[in-house]
């Protein structure tokens, strides 16, 4: 029973960590973007203030049952995926169920939240929301191809489909997967541009065009919950990438407090660096049209992914 | 009386009875059908013993009836789905004419499928196969002139398949001297070494029913033109008869072949796998541009059958298990989805997604079924569809070394999210237009079968082991030893697992917490505003303003994937058909109707004979 209590405590701790880090990163990006555009910009904790404001608002009107369910689905997907990926390789604080669900499961589970959001957006009847969903689904078909190619490359190179195993292998050999299979890493990096939906791939929300797209009919607590879910998802994607390609974080041989904190620090450095890739790319690019975005992913990133798979077969 | 004969007899008398009853009281025709199938299901699941064999001879040919562990899987599928579909059909077909015609063919097609399951020899197999094909053809053309062309296409391809199968059967008798299926397998009829054309001919015959490219072109039209209560069976169960046959042939090829990695076996594996993969991709991208919900589902059926064939083609334990699991799950969710389309058709009068939208509040139960089935179709956890998809991917990655096929399948199933959403959005979400104000929820007898199917999907997501048990036994019959399965843990050969119990527990706990703290409170505190009350940048939409977004829903994707849309198997077949027609037309001109021309032909023939008399009549 004590074990179960510890696990529940750990699950809550993991969720809080993912949420905090995701929100803070979002705030930092807002600040950085403002400075690049020669504005002063909001403080880095602005996202928390926004969330606080949204959560104290009272929701008066509703757009039907799926509208009620959309934020729930997003949070379900976010928390479930978060609990099934390793936060640190070997630790005491964060429970991790990655032995009970592998990469294929994670890939599909990540879609669960988007589906809920799409359904909620659909029921509101706002044409902008529907257009946003149509674009989002189309873009997903675009970036999933290089992403899955890179994952397949990793899986066949190391004959495992578990994230934990892949991290452990990198820890033991001391070689990051980004170096042992650079093509797969590049393909995944390109795919991440679409995943984070910064320019030029911000076609789903598309400010000044779709009036923020799928979320346009949500407000108050619902929007706040969706925002939290989005923040957790950002953390999830970054952590997943770090564990898949950048050697992971944490030391399974030493699970002391100092080592765990050190591991957390490494995780933060790696995820933040990785997060800057789509952000930097976005600063210097205007928005693509949907078909351009899809075709972007089907050209070089897919080619790199295919090379990555061939590399994995013959290495 | 022998139970097998009794079941077939009940079917045939039920078919005649429903035809006669329609003359007296049309209302009871549907009920007769339901009762017939219910009686047969009851008899089958209580009286029939697995592996019992009945011998008899007909016209000097030894024939056998029986059920083995493998065909038992399909018996569950066929009888279960037929029972629900016939219940659904009672109200769905209520106001139609010629119900006697429809229901007698309905029963006959199910009798055909059950007969196929019973058959242990090729002769009765073929006879029942033809009963199934013909009765389903008659239902496809039930609508008369509107569907006669689709019916013709279906019949032509079925005929191609039937002749291929018949050739194979006769060759088996000629080469191995037996009509009994198991004896033929033991004698090595499917060995892929001596008579390589026998398994290939059989596979062609089965591939037509399983809608494998390039023999699939009949499917989208035939599925969407038949009445939906029948399409639920047509796509859900009847296509699985093709899978049944393919599984039997392929498993024998793989397990009886002397060298499993022999060149021709590898080629077969690759060709079938890629055909399945390409079928999946092409059907998916055509599904997502459809505006008719029925047609969308029809294309999606073809795509899903592609996955199943990919699974079978791997020939590995996990792959075949995935294929059989997907076969059952596909029957469940596609049966449910076609019923949803049928319910919408009956209540609204059309399934054209550009004409209707926003049915969610009018038809909540139908929406629930559609939602659950779509989640299963898309393979999103935690429902049964995910289990099948997971096993399929793992089989391809870990066991069959066919890495690029994984990508093809993955592309197809990601694009499947698009048409999945299109289906839900097109029918149930979006603007609530005035035209649908009068719409009511479907009658109870239509809701019950749909909801039962939805519940099956939920249960198989949590406890896929329920289905693994019969599948594992069936696979042992096919020659796979030590088929491991667990109630709710999926394991691949590398030892990684997906534990459905943990997954469902996590999802359930998070759901309950968030639902209590967020939704429950707001469900009461909020009031529903119409779909016109939305953020439109300050403009206020008037009552009659059309805000529906349904046309060209995935236009950008269509533009991006334009090269893919240029290829169409349908067009190639049509061109071939036109070319043949031109040749036949030319041949026809020989018969001018003029006696002088015919006299000329006779003279020309005699002249030719004279010229070549030395070479033709040497001895």
Image (cartoon, grey):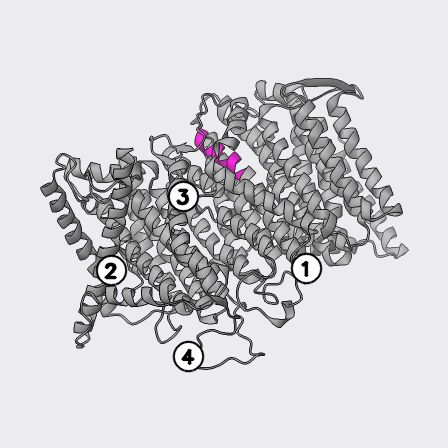
Q: Residue at x 77, y 43 (%)?
A: B31
Q: Residue at x 44, y 43 (%)?
A: B382
Instruction: Give how far apart the Cα atoms at labels 2 and 4 are.
Output: 28 Å
Q: Residue at x 70, y 30 (%)?
A: B42
Q: Which residue is mark 1?
A: B347
Q: Which residue is mark 3?
A: B406
Instruction: Give how far apart the Cα atoms at labels 1 and 2 are.
Output: 47 Å
Query: Label 2's element?
Result: helix
* Mark sitting earlier along the chain (1/4): 1
Q: Mark 4 and mark 2 in contact (Cβ < 8 Å)?
A: no
Could you classify mark 2 by the number of other residues whose Cα lies within 10 Å: few (under 14), some (14-19), or many (20 or more)?
many
Q: Residue at x 19, y 75 (%)?
A: A37
> Disc 2: which chain?
A
Magenta region, residue range:
B316-327
Q: Which residue is mark 4?
A: B537
Any part of residue A270 in sight: yes
Magenta segment includes B326: yes
Same chain shared by disc 3 and disc 2: no
Query: Label 3's element?
Result: helix
């Amino acid at each position: 029973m004590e074990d179960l209590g510890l696990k529940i405590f750990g699950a809550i701790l993991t969720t809080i960590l993912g949420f905090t880090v995701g929100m803070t990163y979002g705030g930092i990006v807002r600040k950085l973007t403002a400075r690049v555009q020669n504005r002063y910009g909001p403080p880095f904790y602005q996202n928390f203030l926004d969330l606080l404001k949204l959560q104290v608002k009272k929701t008066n009107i509703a757009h039907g049952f799926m509208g009620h369910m959309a934020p729930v689905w997003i949070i379900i997907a976010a928390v479930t995926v978060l609990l099934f990926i390793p936060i640190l390789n070997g630790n005491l604080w964060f429970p991790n169920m990655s032995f009970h669900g592998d990469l294929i499961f994670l890939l599909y589970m990540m879609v669960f939240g988007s589906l809920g959001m799409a359904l909620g957006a659909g029921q509101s009847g706002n044409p902008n929301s529907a257009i946003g969903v149509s674009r989002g689904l189309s873009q997903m078909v675009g970036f999933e191809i290089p992403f899955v190619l890179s994952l397949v490359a990793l899986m066949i190179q190391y004959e495992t489909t578990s994230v934990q195993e892949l991290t452990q292998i990198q820890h033991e050999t001391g070689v990051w997967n980004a170096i042992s299979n650079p093509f797969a890493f590049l393909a995944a990096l390109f795919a991440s541009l679409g995943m984070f939906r910064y320019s030029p791939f911000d076609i789903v929300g598309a400010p000044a065009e779709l009036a923020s797209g799928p979320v346009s009919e949500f407000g108050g607590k619902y929007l706040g919950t969706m925002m939290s879910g989005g923040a957790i998802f950002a953390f999830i994607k970054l952590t997943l990438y770090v564990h898949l390609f950048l050697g992971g974080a944490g030391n399974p041989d030493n699970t002391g407090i100092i080592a765990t904190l050190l591991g957390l620090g490494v995780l933060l450095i790696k995820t933040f660096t990785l997060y800057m890739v789509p952000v930097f790319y976005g600063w210097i690019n205007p928005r693509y049209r949907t078909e351009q975005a899809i075709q972007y992913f089907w050209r070089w990133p897919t080619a790199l992914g295919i090379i990555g798979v061939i590399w994995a077969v013959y290495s | 009386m022998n139970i097998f004969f009794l079941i077939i007899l009940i079917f045939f008398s039920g078919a005649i009875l429903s035809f006669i009853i329609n003359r007296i009281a049309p209302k009871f025709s549907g009920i007769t059908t339901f009762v017939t199938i219910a009686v047969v299901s009851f008899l089958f699941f209580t009286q029939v013993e697995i592996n019992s064999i009945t011998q008899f001879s007909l016209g000097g040919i030894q024939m056998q009836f029986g059920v083995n562990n493998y065909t038992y899987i399909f018996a569950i599928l066929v009888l279960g789905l037929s029972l629900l579909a016939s219940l659904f059909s009672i109200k769905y077909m209520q106001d139609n004419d010629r119900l006697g015609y429809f229901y007698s063919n309905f029963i006959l097609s199910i009798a055909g499928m059950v007969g196929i399951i019973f058959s242990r020899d090729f002769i009765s197999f073929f006879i029942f196969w033809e009963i199934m094909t013909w009765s389903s053809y008659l239902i496809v053309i039930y609508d008369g002139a509107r569907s006669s062309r689709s019916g013709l296409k279906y019949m032509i391809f079925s005929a191609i398949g039937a002749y291929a199968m018949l050739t194979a059967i006769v060759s088996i008798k000629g080469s191995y001297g037996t009509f009994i299926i198991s004896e033929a397998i033991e004698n090595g009829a499917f060995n892929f070494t001596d008579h390589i054309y026998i398994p290939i001919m059989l596979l062609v015959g089965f591939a037509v029913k399983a809608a494998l490219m390039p023999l699939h072109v009949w499917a989208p039209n035939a599925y969407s033109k038949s009445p939906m209560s029948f399409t639920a069976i047509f796509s859900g169960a009847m296509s699985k008869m093709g899978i049944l046959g393919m599984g039997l042939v392929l498993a024998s090829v793989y397990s009886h072949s002397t060298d499993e990695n022999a060149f021709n076996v590898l080629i077969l594996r690759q060709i079938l796998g890629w055909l399945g993969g390409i079928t999946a991709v092409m059907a998916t991208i055509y599904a997502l541009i459809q505006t008719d919900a029925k047609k969308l589902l029809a294309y999606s059926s073809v795509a899903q059958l592609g996955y199943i064939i990919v699974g079978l083609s791997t020939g590995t334990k996990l792959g075949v298990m995935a294929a059989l699991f997907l076969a059952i799950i596909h029957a469940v969710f596609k049966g449910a989805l076609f019923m949803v389309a049928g319910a919408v058709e009956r209540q609204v009068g059309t399934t054209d997604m550009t004409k209707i939208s926003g049915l969610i509040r009018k038809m909540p139960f139908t929406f629930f079924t559609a939602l659950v089935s779509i989640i299963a179709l898309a393979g999103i956890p935690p429902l049964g569809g995910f289990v099948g998809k997971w096993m399929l991917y793992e089989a391809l990655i870990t066991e069959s070394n066919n890495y690029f096929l994984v990508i093809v399948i993955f592309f197809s199933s990601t694009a499947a999210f698009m048409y999945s959403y299109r289906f839900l959005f097109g029918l149930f979400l979006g603007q609530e237009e005035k035209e649908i104000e009068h719409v009511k929820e479907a009658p109870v007898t239509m809701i019950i079968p749909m909801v039962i199917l939805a519940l099956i999907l939920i249960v198989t997501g949590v406890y896929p082991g329920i289905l693994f048990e019969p599948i594992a036994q069936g696979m042992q019959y096919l020659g796979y030893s030590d088929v491991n399965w667990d109630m709710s843990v999926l394991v691949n050969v590398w030892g990684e697992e997906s534990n459905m119990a943990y997954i469902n527990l996590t999802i359930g706990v998070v759901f309950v917490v968030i639902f209590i703290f967020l939704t429950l409170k707001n469900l009461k505190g909020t009031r529903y505003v119409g779909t016109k009350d939305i953020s439109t940048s300050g403009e206020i939409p008037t009552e009659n303003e059309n805000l529906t977004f349904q046309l060209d829903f995935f236009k950008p994707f269509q533009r991006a994937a334009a090269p893919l849309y240029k290829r169409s198997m349908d067009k190639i077949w049509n061109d071939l058909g036109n070319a043949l027609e031109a040749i036949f037309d030319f041949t026809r001109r020989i018969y001018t109707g003029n006696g002088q021309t015919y006299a000329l032909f006779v003279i020309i023939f005699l002249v030719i004979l004279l010229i070549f008399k030395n070479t033709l009549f040497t001895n």
